[in-house]
Amino acid sequence: MAPTIEKTTPKPKFTDTHEGRDIGAECGLDGWAVEAQVRAELRTCSYHPVRSVSCEVRGSVLSLRGRVPSYYMKQIAQTIVRHLLKDTVVINNELEVDGTD
């Protein structure tokens, strides 16, 4: 009798250990207030491309979206957010680098 091979679904390599957390509550603000605070901080950046970065909060994850001309600008945007929110949130940096500018 041939051995049977059981099919299993592979586990994801990365899991969100922050699932279920509410960053607004942890910051003492609601999600909209966190977004507004992050947007305001990005708008004051001396690097103009960073000023157009958008953000969205979902649960414990803050996503950065938009286009910037370099990886340096992508990192600047993330650093601004990290500095502002400390370790209360997971940052999903979805910024696209468009080096044509």
Image (cartoon, helix red, strand yellow):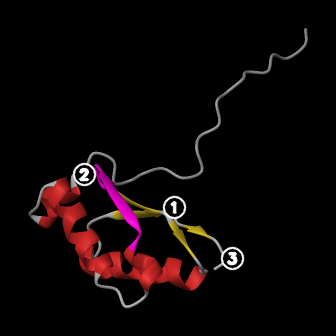
Furthest toward the front, the residue is 101
Q: Is residue 15 left or right of residue 58?
A: right
Kind of element beneath mark 1: loop
Q: Which residue is mark 3?
A: 100
Which of 45/10 is in front?
45
Chain part drawn in magenta: 52-61
In 3D space, how far apart are the residues under numbered discs 2 and 1 (Cα atoms)?
Answer: 21 Å
Q: Amino acid at mark 2?
A: Arg
Residue 2 relative to residue 26: left or right: right
Q: Residue at x 60, y 81 (%)?
A: 70
- Tell me the residue that label 1 is attached to: 94
- The residue mark sitting in front, 3 or 2, is 3
Q: How many marks?
A: 3
Look at mark 2 in the image and give the residue it sits on: 21
Image point 35% across, 81% down: which residue? Answer: 80
Would residue 97 be counted in the magenta stretch? no
Real-space CA distance between mark 1 and mark 3, rounded to the nearest whole angstrom:
18 Å
- Of pointers 2 and 1, the one earlier in the residue sequence: 2
Q: Is residue 57 magenta?
A: yes
Give how far across and how far down residue 27 sits, in percent.
15, 66
Whole-percent x, y for residue 15 in the image: 48, 50
Q: Secondary structure at mark 3?
A: loop
Q: Quadrant of residue 43?
A: bottom left
Q: Nearer the viewer, residue 33 or 10?
A: 33
Q: Specify which label sits upstream in the sequence, 1 or 3.
A: 1
Question: Which of the two labelled residues, at mark 3 and mark 2, occupies the earlier sequence position?
Answer: 2
Neighbour tally class for label 3: few under 14, some 14-19, many 20 plus, Cα within 10 Å: few
Q: Are marks 3 and 2 in contact (CB under 8 Å)?
A: no
Q: Is residue 100 above or below residue 46?
A: above
Task: Identify which residue is drawn at 32% across, 77% down.
Answer: 42
Residue furthest left in the image: 28
The amino acid on which the numbered mark 1 sits, given as a three-letter code, is Glu
